[in-house]
Amino acid sequence: MSFTAAAKVFILFGDPVAHSLSPVMQNAALQAAGIDGLYIPWRVQSTDLPTAFESIRRMENFGGANVTIPHKEQAFTLVDTLTPEAAAVGAINTVVSKDGRLLGANTDGPGFIRSLHEGADFLPRGKPVVILGAGGAARAVAVSLAGAGAAPIVIINRTAERAQSLTEFIHGTIGATALGLGLDDPRTPTSVRDCALVVNTTSVGLHPTDPSPIDPHLLQPGVVVYDLIYRPRETALLREAKRRGCRVVGGLGMLLYQGALAFELWTGIEPSEAAMRQALVTAVA
Ligand code: NAP
């Protein structure tokens, strides 16, 4: 990787950030595009995020930024304008500097939908779906699936109140038919048995010894099972789902496509997805 003293600087805000694969992926894209720039992680606590955003406003060689855990919702309040997608989700993962103003975008949902289509040829319109989890990633996934016409959308979460609150949010903003349940709700097993798509957005599976976040016996053959987790590449959920004849997709494609969309917003250039994918695959291996 090479850059000069005039390089544009691209930043990833998060806490922690050391685990992120975005630097390796975005630096590969910058290099492949021949852009004089570098992408760096900036670990920052929530209390200091407003100051960090003030700094990028004054940084003349600011190229663009990503925002990751736990700052996506706070960053939403620190930009000047929002894309319609970001406004619908209520959180941002991308910051673009435009005419001296900061634009907040959310590329997680579109990245997920593209990866779902590519990985399983799945079109959500009219299909019943289950989302496991109700955190930040679930919000982006739920809004994108609701926007793509999935129905009904059942959100199942350890903390039932969070599932219900996300359900009310997508019903209120998009008008989607949605239901929020706790893991032990008597309607949970039927919802999983009857759906066409299960998406895991919980962090259960990040550790190689983690069990499946849902009873795998409920998974029916032919159902698409998507796990947002990309490291390990095969979680217990995907392993069990594959064994039961489901079509399975891991989270690497979403990571790639949300990153490619962010890159295009910052630079106006379509990045080399081949270079980004290669960097990711090497890093994950
Ligand atoms: P988050 O806001 O912290 O939400 C975490 C969710 O996991 C919550 O619903 C939480 O339930 C649930 N959870 C955590 N531990 C659990 C346990 N032991 N049992 C059952 N449920 C549990 O995190 P996030 O930002 O949504 O991220 C979630 C996952 O998505 C992470 O693994 C992240 O790496 C992945 N992700 C991947 C991509 C990609 O590009 N592939 C993009 C974004 C995120 P409670 O509400 O009950 O706490």
Image (cartoon, helix red, strand yellow):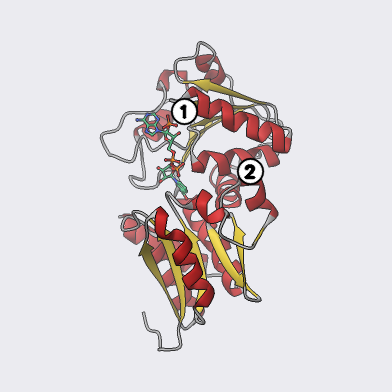
- At horizontal 47% and vertical 19% (from top left) the residue drawn is 218
Relative image position of residue 285 (x, y in whole percent) = 30, 55
Position of 161 relative to 144 (above/below): above
- Count of numbered badges drawn on the protein: 2
Task: Please state, as top left, top right, bottom left or bottom right, where the N terminus lies in the image.
Answer: bottom left
State left or right for residue 77 relative to residue 22: right
In the picture of the structure, the residue carrying the numbered disc 1 is 245
Residue 144: image tag: 2
Q: Amino acid at mark 2?
A: Ser
Q: Earlier in the sequence, mark 1 or mark 2?
A: 2
Relative image position of residue 171 (x, y in whole percent) = 69, 31
Mark toward the viewer: 1 or 2 = 2
Quadrant of ligand 1 in image: top left
Say few, some or many: other residues with alpha carbon within 10 Å of mark 1 (under 14 / 14 to 19 / 20 or more).
Answer: some
State left or right for residue 88 relative to residue 46: right
Residue 282: image tag: none
Relative image position of residue 168 (x, y in whole percent) = 64, 29
- At horizontal 45% and vertical 43% (from top left) the residue drawn is 228
Task: Quote the CA–CA distance across marks 1 and 2.
Answer: 26 Å
Position of 3 relative to 105 (above/below): below
Secondary structure beneath label 1: loop
Q: Amino acid at mark 1?
A: Gly
